[in-house]
Every structure is written in C-alpha cells, then in structure tokens.
Image (spheres, helix red, strand yellow):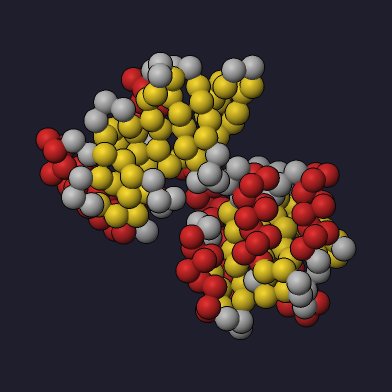
C-alpha cells in the first residue's frame, strides 16, 4: 500500500521515485531521507511513492508507469528484491535505476549483474544514500535519448542502455541491457552518426557499434559483453580497440 507522496513545488527537473521495504521503520527512514533530500535540492521535483509490499508497487507501475529510480529492499517475505528488479527492468526496458538496500552482502553479485545503480548494506548512513541519489540523478540528467523507428512503432531509448548495435540484412539490430532487441531499417553508418555526441561508443569493424561500459572482457579475438554475447574483433583493430577501452576507463575514473 502506498504510504507517502512527497512532491516539492519546484518543477525544473521532475524525477519519479519509488521506495519498497517490508519493514515499516526502514520504509519511514528512507522516506524521511528522500524528503529531506528533495527539500535541499530546489532544482528538483521528486514525486515519491512508498510501499510495504512489492506487488503493490508493481501494480502501481502498471497504472502510473515505471519510475526513474527505485529504492528496493532485497530480503522480503515470499519474494527477493532481485526478482522484483527483473520485473521492473522488463517493464521499463532497462530505463529504471535501482538502488538495492539489504542487511546481507550475499546478493551483491546478482544485483550488479542487473546493472544496479548502487548496493547499500544496512545500516547505511544518510550521507551514503544521498550520495547514491546525487550520482544517479546527475547521470539521468545527462542521458541522451533518441527515437528509433521499428516498423510502425517508434521507441524512445536511452543510448546508455544500448549494449551494442549490429548491422544485419540491410537493418540495424539494437541490443539493450534489458535483453530486448529492436530492429530498425537503416544503415550502421547512419546509426553511427547518432553516437557522435556520446562518449564510450566505438565501431568494431563494419558491422558493430559497442558500448564500452558494457564490455565484460577483452578476449583474444572477441569482446565479451555483459549479457554474455561475443563481438568478433578483426585482427587489425585489436590493438587500437584495447587502447580505446583503457583510455575510456581512465577518463571515467579521473572525471568522477
């Protein structure tokens, strides 16, 4: 059941946020922290909804749409937060950032396999949670969204949710973190122009554009992506691609 709804007046940047924890005291604590966070960030309008039951939260998403950010407990009666997260990400096509909160570190690997925005172990400090919110909100404000035409449908996708794009049969297949694949009738060259303003995307041969953030391993002849797919790397490009990969992560580390 929804237990809170906090809507600061300023509407410069609107973010929808949901919180779910089966412990009332924990839910109230998170709600208080987020409420105070909203009041100290006058540039934001945070629409916050709180739930003791994850099924109620999913039901609300079906009515009002998926939120931008979810604060989600993992260990809840009858269902794990990681299972709930998969449902949320399926509904949002990977466009919701999830902060997991739990008393156990045991689910960290599974959580980050779901591209978790953060993983906080209880008891966490107010500063730790607000730092996580700062980072995710700033990331969302800097995202690049593009419309993609797929037959009679048009999908709005976040470039940073793209794992890779592959040219195939006079079309481009766009593979997303959510596991969904969108097919658009264009050339890879035309699609590549979209990525000119986005850091971290590189062409791999004539058939692929890859999001370096989603590269799990640089292998001898392929790139292993975070979903397990392998992208073949032509021999002539291996040295340069390795350099691009390390240069990108060096910039990412020094800019944070």
Residue shown at 83% from the left, 44% from the top = 63
Rendered location of residue 103, percent (x, y) = 61, 81
* Whether residue 188 is visible: yes
149 relative to 9, above or below: above
Q: Could you tell me which quadrant the C terminus lies in?
A: bottom left
Residue 217, by quadrant, is: bottom left
Rendered location of residue 47, percent (x, y) = 75, 52
Q: Is residue 146 left or right of residue 102?
A: left
Residue shown at 34% from the left, 33% from the top = 209
114 relative to 232, above or below: below
Residue 206, by quadrant, is: top left
* Whether residue 142 is visible: no
Residue shown at 60% from the left, 67% from the top = 100
Q: Could you tell me which quadrant the N terminus lies in?
A: bottom right
Residue 169, by quadrant, is: top left
* Front-most of residues 242 and 33: 242
Q: Is residue 190 left or right of residue 80?
A: left
């Amino acid at each position: 059941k929804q237990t809170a709804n906090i809507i600061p007046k300023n509407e410069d940047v609107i973010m929808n946020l949901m919180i779910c924890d089966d412990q009332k005291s924990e839910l109230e604590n998170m709600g208080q922290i987020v409420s105070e966070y909203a009041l100290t960030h006058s540039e934001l309008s945070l629409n916050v909804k709180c739930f003791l039951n994850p099924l109620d939260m999913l039901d609300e998403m079906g009515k009002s749409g998926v939120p931008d950010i979810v604060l989600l407990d993992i260990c809840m009666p009858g269902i794990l937060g990681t299972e709930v997260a998969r449902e949320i990400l399926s509904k949002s096509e990977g466009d919701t950032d999830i902060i997991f909160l739990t008393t156990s570190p045991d689910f960290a690997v599974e959580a980050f396999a779901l591209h978790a925005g953060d993983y906080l172990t209880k008891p966490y400090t107010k500063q730790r949670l607000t730092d996580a919110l700062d980072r995710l909100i700033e990331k969302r404000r800097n995202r690049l969204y593009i419309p993609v035409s797929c037959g009679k449908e048009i999908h709005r996708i976040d470039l940073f949710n793209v794992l890779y794009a592959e040219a195939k049969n006079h079309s481009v297949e766009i593979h997303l973190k959510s596991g969904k694949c969108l097919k658009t009738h264009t050339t890879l060259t035309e699609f590549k122009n979209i990525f000119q303003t986005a850091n971290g995307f590189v062409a791999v041969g004539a058939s692929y554009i890859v999001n370096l953030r989603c590269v799990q391993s640089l292998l001898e002849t392929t790139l292993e992506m975070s979903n397990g797919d392998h992208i073949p790397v032509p021999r002539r490009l291996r040295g340069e691609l390795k350099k691009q990969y390390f240069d990108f992560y060096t910039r990412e580390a020094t800019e944070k």
